[in-house]
Image (cartoon, helix red, strand yellow):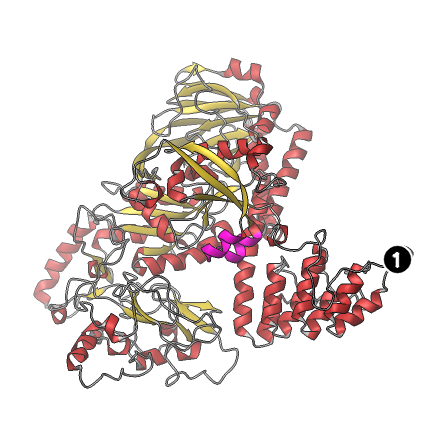
Amino acid sequence: MWRYRSWDVPQIPAEAPQTQKAITKSGLQHLAPPPPALGAPCSGDPERQIRSIVDWSESATYGEHIWFETNVSGDFCYVGEQYCVAKMLKSVPRRKCAACKIVVHTPCIEQLEKINFRCKPSFRESGSRNVREPTFVRHHWVHRRRQDGKCRHCGKGFQQKFTFHSKEIVAISCSWCKQAYHSKVSCFMLQQIEEPCSLGVHAAVVIPPTWILRARRPQNTLKASKKKKRASFKRKSSKKGPEEGRWRPFIIRPTPSPLMKPLLVFVNPKSGGNQGAKIIQSFLWYLNPRQVFDLSQGGPREALEMYRKVHNLRILACGGDGTVGWILSTLDQLRLKPPPPVAILPLGTGNDLARTLNWGGGYTDEPVSKILSHVEEGNVVQLDRWDLRVEPNPEEGPEERDEGATDRLPLDVFNNYFSLGFDAHVTLEFHESREANPEKFNSRFRNKMFYAGTAFSDFLMGSSKDLAKHIRVVCDGTDLTPKIQDLKPQCIVFLNIPRYCAGTMPWGHPGEHHDFEPQRHDDGYLEVIGFTMTSLAALQVGGHGERLTQCREVVLTTSKAIPVQVDGEPCKLVASRIRITLRNQATMVQKAKRRSATPLHSDQQQVPEQLRIQVSRVSMHDYEALHYDKEQLKEASVPLGTVVVPGDSDLELCRVHIERLQQEPEGAGAESPTCQKLSPKWCFLDATTASRFYRIDRAQEHLNYVTEIAQDEIYILDPELLGASARPDLPTPTSPLPTSPCSPTPRSLPGDAAPPKGEELVEAAKRNDFCKLQELHRAGGDLMHRDDQSRTLLHHAVSTGSKEVVRYLLDHAPQEILDAVEENGETCLHQAAALGQRTICHYIVEAGASLMKTDQQGDTPRQRAEKAQDTELAAYLENRQHYQMIQREDQETAV
């Protein structure tokens, strides 16, 4: 059977001459039509060859790749053996294109020009020579050695060998629409190759490359008679604003469609522990790279100016609430009409605005494809924004001025809240300490501990206890000062949205404030709340502050320097008069509740009155190891019981039933009579709407129905549940040992017999004598014994490469053996990685060993594998290390 190869011209059967024409028109790799002359790549420019950001200059290359460093060594270099210049070298760095997902050696990037393989084009040329250029988008076909899903033509899956080395091309897929075909004539060539690309399931939000034109720079050889007209034109254009008269290398010429909602994605790469730097690559794959912008490369203004005339434009802000405020302020300055609505992908911690608009408290692992669907389907809502105008308090004397105070606020507008007193003082001390010693604030856990320590010391000092004596608050003409002096608050918050301080509800839950109107983010009213130390402490466990009033205008007067903060930006403000008034309303995208009247993904069924559904629990250990394989993860789950919920139940209601199940031991069923109780941090898993399991943020449970995330069984993730070792079908130290061929029946020593010496266990591990080791353990031997060099039995088993002994020790020794170190600081995983023992490394990692521990040279197990020139093993260890970091961040956030 004839198949394509990525490094030479396909051998076309003589009896199929019509196939040659079809291949030539398909734009497949080296047979792709040449790019326009203006966009020809320059092989002598190494800076252009290795770009990691989109080039917006006039010298941008047509079809240029966007390279990121990678350890994905399981795939061969894309240029093929004929052109690969690094195939005989070891430890050659590799790079992966984020837009088309090919992997090449770094020295082989220039070879891509020889096989004429370019990335999917993100723009088109303008000018007379491109008049005949089609206005539709062509497919961009790429060979794949690994491909998920099924063939578009025959409907069969892609048979592929999941090995470290696989040269076979199994599929040809389009990096625009993601359609894939078997790499054989019977599947790929029978499709209509000349049809335009549909741009896939997210076509409504993708900006087609045909909309983006590279403009030619105006020629300077003008006749003298035309120079006056040009000067006159410049004077007229200058009145329109600098952005309208300035020449840009690229212009946007959209083709409006009522069904399209073009999207601009702004990513703050520093948000969320550098989550943004990782997620930006996923957006480059799903979208046109020229609609994805890195905010560290100059901010959002240039992009918003360029796309200002695009109809139905939407914006996705990937970052914290500060990133959202930055974009909203830029939109204010540009005065776009109508202003594009802004959706949020929350990164980092806090994210109170994102919680208010149903986007959750932080990004975990939801597929980017699902996020794009939510942005497209989201509801457009309004958000009040408030002006802060500060002027000096004329009653303050110059001798009372504080040297560390300022007369300006860090922001003159807020979206979330403005506060003064205790909370602002704690935040100010944190910011000042971080600016003085940034190296000490590189961890979420440390940051939270510093906050806690600062809050406690400030509480003992009582620095904010006299706040009421130094302020005067007038709301809508009503003086609240007497009421505030009676309350004696240590903190006052002027709140615009229901959420505050990483998800708390200081105004109280809906229905608890009968004397006031319901709280809204679009009603033109502020909520004024006072906090004592008692109510501040109760806030984290569901309490609320003292509701003072709801108002449209505030005049706040301070008589001394007081710490304040605006949307988390603190300062110490001199005695001032602050006027708070409504500025405008921003247009936002609120994540919508996805109503599905067809449960269990069937178009013919009606919503049943009640659902009887099995609940199964997954441990974090199994989730990290198996989340990409649904069937294995289902097998690793632990049955919890059965719940009966209404057919239209959302996950909030389902949570109540599951927690009620925990309170009724008999409800657990006969299958799990000794079921471990759920921890408070459990969450739901979506098992149906993506190619893998992913977590659902608790703040988004009211947006999801049970019938949308589960079929006949619902899965939940419990980070405190034991891993596979807790399953009843696997042996544990307290369960009977498995029968061994070398020891068919258990044997015990007489009661007065001394337990075996540690040296005997070490000798058995060194000799790979599994039967002897098992016998010594049954006789009371200590599996945690160490020799004179602090080496454990697991160290010795790894050094001899005994998989059977390693598995036995992992199943029966205490968990501490996994990260035990010998004299040189090596764990057993360091040793296995240095020896290139892939299977043993897999056993140790899946048992829960840490991949972040370093030896005396500062190397992690992944770095030891790289030094051993085993790049495949290093890639596996890097992947597992990433998920361990996610788990650790989740635990720190909970703290």
List the residue tagged with mark 1.
750
Q: Is residue 832 left or right of residue 158?
A: right
**As drawn, 880 above or below 189:** above
Element type at marker 1? loop
Disc 1 packing (10 Å; few <14; some 14–19; many ≥20): few
Q: Is residue 267 left or right of residue 315?
A: right
Quarter of the picture holding the N terminus: bottom left
**As drawn, 58 above or below 356:** below
**As drawn, 267 above or below 771:** above
In magenta segment, residue 750:
no
Residue at left 53%, top 23%?
Answer: 545
Magenta span main SS: helix
Q: Is residue 259 left or right of residue 226?
A: right
In magenta segment, residue 631:
yes
Instruction: Give the quarter of the image for residue 37.
Output: bottom left
Q: Position of residue 348 (x, y in %)?
A: 49, 47
Q: Position of residue 649 (x, y in %)?
A: 40, 33
Q: Is residue 846 left or right of residue 190?
A: right
Answer whether residue 424 is visible to the viewer in this image: no
Quarter of the picture holding the C terminus: top right
- Nearest the viewer among 633 and 241 is 633
**As drawn, 561 above or below 177:** above
The boundaries of the magenta stretch are: 621-635
- Nearest the viewer among 403 and 1 is 1
Residue at left 59%, top 36%?
Answer: 426
Answer whether residue 397 is visible to the viewer in this image: yes
